[in-house]
Image (tube, rainbow, N blue to C red):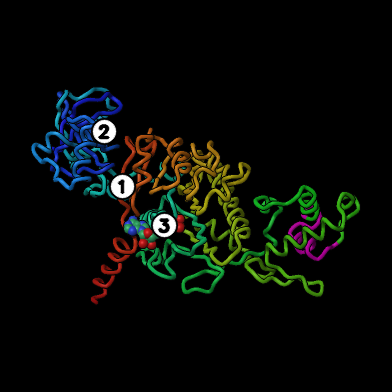
Amino acid sequence: MLGRIISGNTGLLIARKHSRERVELGELVVAPLNNDSKLLLQVVDIGYSSQLDKKLLEFIAGISVEHGESIDEFGKELRYYELLSLTPLLEIRDSNVSAPRVLPGIFTPIYRVNSKDLWFLGGRGVSLGFIRSGSNVLDIEARLPVEKMLSHHVLITGTTGRGKSILMKNLLWQLLDLDNVSCLVIDPHNEYYGINGKGLRLHRNASDSLLYYSPVNYPGAISLIVNISLLRPEHLSIIDFSDAQWQLMNAYYKNYGDKWIEALLLGEELPESLKKSFNEATLNVARRKISLLLDIEIKNNSIIPRGIFTTTGGESTIKSITNALMNGKIVIIDTSTIKSELELLISNMITREVYREKLSRIHKQEQAPIISIVLEEAPRVLKNNENIFSTITREGRKFGIGLIAITQMPSLIPRELLANMNTKIILGTELSSEREAVINSASQDIKYLDRTIASMNKGEAIVTSTFSSIALPIKIPFFDEEIALKEEKEKKKYIGL
Ligand SMILES: Nc1ncnc2c1ncn2[C@@H]1O[C@H](COP(=O)(O)OP(=O)(O)OP(=O)(O)O)[C@@H](O)[C@H]1O
Ligand SMILES: [Mg+2]
């Protein structure tokens, strides 16, 4: 027994703690109710209390501080003690659970939770980690239904270094076993494939189900090159251009079709009917901006590609990526060596094509997997309400296409989009403004977890989701040690090393 309930109300109960028991913030405890059910509660605050008056306590401490006298130990645990503040989470019965609606009797004992109490969390789905009671990890996994979770969008948030990418690696590892789900991962840190360490390439299905695109010639990488004839003015919508520059680009596209970029960069003439509203300065600025963006040099009136946008080859890159995603695969795009603007452009091109293809399959009533698009530093694209990523956040779930938005700064994502992300995985977050943004848009009321969220260690998280009955405290397995290492050992066993 950890203690006994002594006061409170249906929103918050207070228990006196047993002096010998160690209880942590965030721990889960149970209190038996009359009718064979139990109340599941979470420790949300711990404070001192005493039978003695505050002034007297200050006086006793003063005698010791000033005169070095030892403090009277007689009956210490009876006179001084700790009070636990407990938030009721659920009423648990043998066959069902419901929202807590009753109070336990006064002096009801409380106990540490065990895996059996949490029977209702068992089930199928993708595992996010192990249920955690404070820092004590239980032998029960937090699972959510994968198709629903991914099509209704996921936010992964937390201060830098708390383990967002490790969690993402764990999830992708499990998705490599599934055909009904595919993932496009835009990877600005080149950390998922595992070029410099442990990553998804170690998975037994990697050769069949994982595609890795990179501008660098790494072993196992497919060359990331895209032919400039595939570019449309709308792909550049994610980048800042003035109205005059937009009109100019559209005019070139209208007149030159697939060759519009080349024509614009080489300053080819436009017919009089399209030309009149532009001046030479607009053309020059647009040329400079586009050649810088696409890493294309103009020399002796010809264009020399220096980066991933080329004039020869790369015609089928976007199509191949889209096809792979329509076949349940995971596609990683290493954008670590390219400029942020170019990364946005490529992501925009691919995502638009994937969205278009998915809609067309639905229209033709053809089967296609659930597609999830993983975006690191998501506010870069979600702060703007008018692009493909915000469209997906608002409407994608109807078509089975979702986002996994990863960020340290959820407060930069518009509220409406945040509210559309029905699963939020919240890792330790120091800044109160960031906690506020995510707590206010969570699927469960988790205001009482504010301090817990501020104090969580690496790999600890709270999951709120419309697909879970309570906000789940979890410990995320450490990919490098618990997942990749296990696979390596099994492979070695298999080949007899
Ligand atoms: N679940 C975990 N268990 C133990 N240690 C972890 C866990 N997750 C992460 N770590 C440790 O923290 C480090 C940083 O993790 P990770 O790169 O996932 O953080 P992040 O939240 O993605 O940071 P950033 O915002 O900078 O991208 C890891 O290299 C690892 O040492
Ligand atoms: Mg990261």
The answer for how far apart the CA atoms under marks 3 and 2 are is: 30 Å
Residue at which label 3 appears: 161
Residue at which label 2 appears: 86
Above or below residue 260? Residue 103 is above
- The image quadrant that residue 23 belongs to is top left
Residue at which label 1 appears: 474
The magenta-colored residue range is 253-268
Q: Is the distance from the Cβ of mark 2 to the nearest ligand 1 atom less than 8 Å?
A: no
The answer for how far apart the CA atoms under marks 3 and 1 are is: 17 Å
Residue 371 image position (x, y, % from top left): 48, 49
Three-letter amino acid code at disc 1? Ile
Residue 407 image position (x, y, % from top left): 48, 50
Quadrant location of the N terminus?
top left
Q: Is residue 250 magenta?
A: no
- The image quadrant that residue 341 belongs to is bottom right
Residue 347 image position (x, y, % from top left): 58, 55
Identify the residue at image location x=14%, y=38%: 18
Identify the residue at image location x=31%, y=61%: 483
Residue 474 image position (x, y, % from top left): 31, 47
Main secondary structure found in the magenta portion: helix
Three-letter amino acid code at disc 3? Gly
Residue 159 in view of the camera = yes
Three-letter amino acid code at disc 2? Leu
